[in-house]
Amino acid sequence: MIEKSELMNQALLIPDAIGVYIFKAQDGEYIYIGFSRKLRSRCMAHIIGQSGQFKAAAIISLSCMVEAIETKTIEEAKSLEKQLIVKHKPRYNKAHKNIPNSEKRHHMTFDIDPEKKLEMIALAERRNITLKTWLMRAIEHAIKEERKHD
């Protein structure tokens, strides 16, 4: 286990720029991945415990190194964070729980003829919800049914 002061020293070398930060264990396991507009400040907040959460303390106690990858925009940082979470599945990222384990993405396209669309709108209106909400519920139901058969 590494001293907290060593993690702080590593964090002080990180630029206070936009990007992705990574806390790793001694064996190279990814413990936590996040993005920030100010990398150094965010890493230091984790290390000194400003978030006040048990999870933050666990992340720091398991971490031996903190690294950062600078990006040009916050959107690029968010995208990179998601890619890294999918690839490395850090144990303290909740975000990876919403991504299928198979790492495949489900893409659905709809080609709805105008008569069916009117019927769908009527069904949604009868339930006092928007068409978008009705479609999302239908998609969620279809995904649940698909997973039952996997």
Image: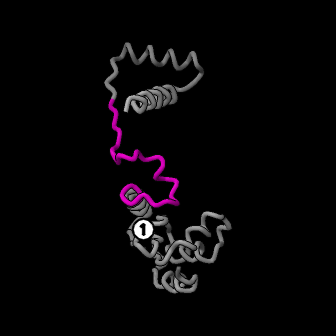
Of 90 and 124, the residue lying toward us: 90
Q: Where residue 36 appears, x then y in whole percent?
A: 50, 67
Total labels drawn: 1
Q: Which quarter of the image is occupied by the C terminus?
A: top left
Q: Is residue 35 one of those drawn in magenta? A: no
The spot of residue 94 in percent (x, y) is 52, 54
Q: Nearer the viewer, residue 150 or 45?
A: 150
Secondary structure, mark 1, is loop
Reading the image, the residue beneath label 1 is 29
Can I make out residue 60 in this image?
A: yes
Q: Is residue 81 above or below residue 15?
A: above
Outermost residue to the right: 52
Find residue 119 and report its horizontal and vertical position in percent: 44, 13
Which segment did they paint magenta?
Answer: 85-109
Query: Residue at the spot x=43%, y=66% of the render?
Result: 30
Q: What amino acid is labelled 1 in the image?
A: Glu
Left or right of 87 on screen, residue 55: right
Front residue of 104/1: it is: 1
Q: Is residue 35 visible?
A: no
Crowding near the residue tagged with mark 1, few <14, some 14–19, many ≥20 C-alpha atoms within 10 Å: some
Identify the colour scheme used.
Answer: one colour
Q: Residue 106: say if magenta.
A: yes
